[in-house]
Amino acid sequence: MLIRGLALLAMLPLLAAAHEETAFGRAADPRAAKRTVRVEMSDAMRFQPAEIRIKRGEVVRFVPINRGQVMHEMVLGTLENLKQHADLMRRHPHMEHEEAHMAHVAPGKSGEIGWQFTHAGEFYYACLIPGHFEAGMIGKVTVTP
């Protein structure tokens, strides 16, 4: 019993981080989503669709699909977050990162992000692989009240 209790205490920071609130929402279990949004990524450095409308509080399962021949990623965030992260990626192109609000997708594959937008407003998704964001690989999420 004591060992189980200690193991649970050790896991608490990880459980809290999994549901950490950001300016653009929080991670959610994709299985809890009532809506799935497929987002195609191409080597033309574009997302399809380029704009998505979501209701505040809605849990969404994003399925980014890489239709290209090179690696792409879908990263959710505010425009400022994405610009800062893109700059960091340019300076450290081999940096590995894994967060609940991003999916790295190899050519011909798909990924998954479960997300709940908890604030109304305009948010974005982008590919932050060096050169992709700068080439216009960005989409907009409008979250309505």
Image (cartoon, rainbow, N blue to C red):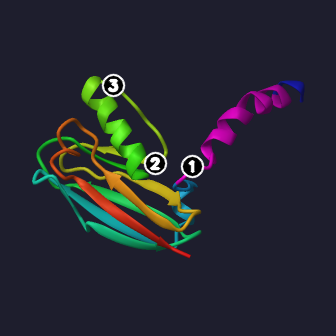
Q: Amino acid at mark 1?
A: Thr
Label placed on residue 95? 3
Front of the two marks 1 and 3 = 1
Residue 15 on the magenta segment? yes
Across and down, in percent, residue 62 comes to 40, 61
CA separation in Å, label 1 and label 3: 22 Å
Q: Main secondary structure of the magenta part?
A: helix
Left or right, 52 with reference to 44: right
Q: Is residue 136 above or below residue 131?
A: below
Mark 3: secondary structure: loop
Residue occupying the far front of the picture: 80
Label placed on residue 136? none
Quadrant, the N terminus = top right
The residues colored magenta run: 4-23
Q: Amino acid at mark 2?
A: His
Mark 1: secondary structure: loop
Read off the residue under disc 1: 22
Read off the residue under disc 2: 101
CB contact under 8 Å: marks 3 and 2: no
Earlier-in-chain disc, 1 versus 3: 1
Left or right, 83 with reference to 67: right
Q: Amino acid at mark 3?
A: Met
Left or right, 58 with reference to 37: right
Quadrant, the C terminus = bottom right
Q: Dividing the picture into quarters, in which one does residue 11 lie?
A: top right
Q: Does any portion of residue 93 appear in the rendered image?
A: no
Residue name at image x 53 percent, y 68 percent: 120
Q: Is residue 37 above or below residue 64?
A: below
Characterize the local packing of mark 2: few (<14), some (14-19) or many (20 or more) Cα atoms within 10 angstroms: many
